[in-house]
Amino acid sequence: MAAQTDVQRSFTPGERGLEQSFGRAAVILNALAHVGDTGLRFVDIVRVTGFSQTTVHRVVAAMAEHGFIEQEREGARYFLGMRLAGWAFAAANRFSLATVAHPVMQALSQATEDSVFLTIRSGDMATCVARIEGAYPIRALVVKPGDRRVLGLGASSVVLLAFVRDRSEIERVLALPEQQAGYAARGVDEAQVRRWIAEAQRSGYGFAQDLVPGTSGIALPIMGPDGDPVAALSLAAISSRLEQPRQEEVLRLMRAATADIETRLQPLLKARAPL
């Protein structure tokens, strides 16, 4: 009972209930998630959420106190807090996914000397949950564990969306204002995202070039028992290393690695599937 009392005391007096407080916090967190590392100013949070300044100030202050939101040193912008990254890693391992994939990712990185990533879908975002750095130098590591992107932006997030069986779900995601804002922030329009999705569906893999200048990435979906992707396995390298004929050899190794992960993962997913 003591633990329950502590939880109740953590909420600001005067709120009309946990559900309303949680809902407002979720809206603000979602807004921050969709802008990624650019963050939002206080006035932007008010504008995007439609909440009053008083409400935003109260909710943001409470979340900052608990590590869910961080404020840059100058105090102008707010960002998602590192506590959420820890939760993302815990969620990723709910099927022991990170543990299952790690030795396969390690072997793939050693075989190619390139950096390998594991990404999951978290709501309407793609979250990197594991990375193994390759021995071959790369100008810029594209993503790090905990980084989030809108679906459809980057090789991994493309395949997480492109291979969803329900096409209406793809359309729902593409129509979200937050997705549109995420694309615009990277200088990409919806038409380009649709081309990437169509190319992935046609070829069976996602390919992104120069989202980070001089760097390319390839991704394959890791499929669950229901036929939808549960994660994406990707590889990033300087663009010249992913030109043909090497690209086809890398794809061969990635297909084998993806099949290996799926084989290891299926018994765990089936054991936890609802009856």
Image: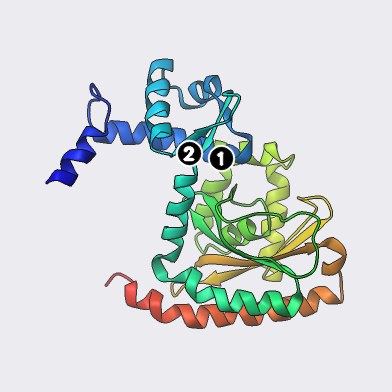
Q: Nearer the viewer, residue 133 or 186?
A: 133
Residue 5 locus on image (x, y percent): 16, 39
Taking the image as shown, residue 251 lies to the left or right of residue 152, namely right
Taking the image as shown, residue 33 lies to the left or right of residue 8, namely right
Residue 271 locus on image (x, y percent): 33, 77
Q: Look at 23% across and 40% down and name the residue there.
A: 7
Count of all numbered marks drawn on residues in the image? 2
Q: Look at 54% across and 19% down and name the residue there.
A: 43
Residue 130 locus on image (x, y percent): 57, 63
Q: Quadrant of residue 90?
A: bottom left
The colour scheme used to paint the residues is rainbow
Provide the secondary structure element on which disc 1 rests.
Answer: helix
From the image, tell me which residue sits under label 1. 34
Q: Look at 72% across and 69% down and name the residue there.
A: 134
Q: Look at 49% across and 21% down and name the residue there.
A: 46
Residue 107 locus on image (x, y percent): 65, 80
Task: Name above or below for residue 207 compared with residue 55.
Answer: below
Q: What amino acid type should be assigned to the residue bearing mark 1?
A: His
Q: Answer whether residue 203 is visible to the viewer in this image.
A: yes
Q: What amino acid type should be assigned to the residue bearing mark 2?
A: Asn
Taking the image as shown, residue 196 lies to the left or right of residue 257, namely right
- Circle 1 packing at 10 Å, graded few (<14), some (14-19), many (20+), is many
From the image, tell me which residue sits under label 2. 30
Q: Nearer the viewer, residue 238 or 9?
A: 9
Residue sticking out furthest to the left: 1
Q: Quadrant of the C terminus?
A: bottom left
- Circle 2 packing at 10 Å, graded few (<14), some (14-19), many (20+), is some
Check contact, mark 2 vs mark 1: CB within 8 A. Answer: yes
| Cα gap from disc 2 to disc 1, whole angstroms | 6 Å
Q: Nearer the viewer, residue 129 or 133?
A: 133
Q: Answer whether residue 227 is visible to the viewer in this image.
A: no
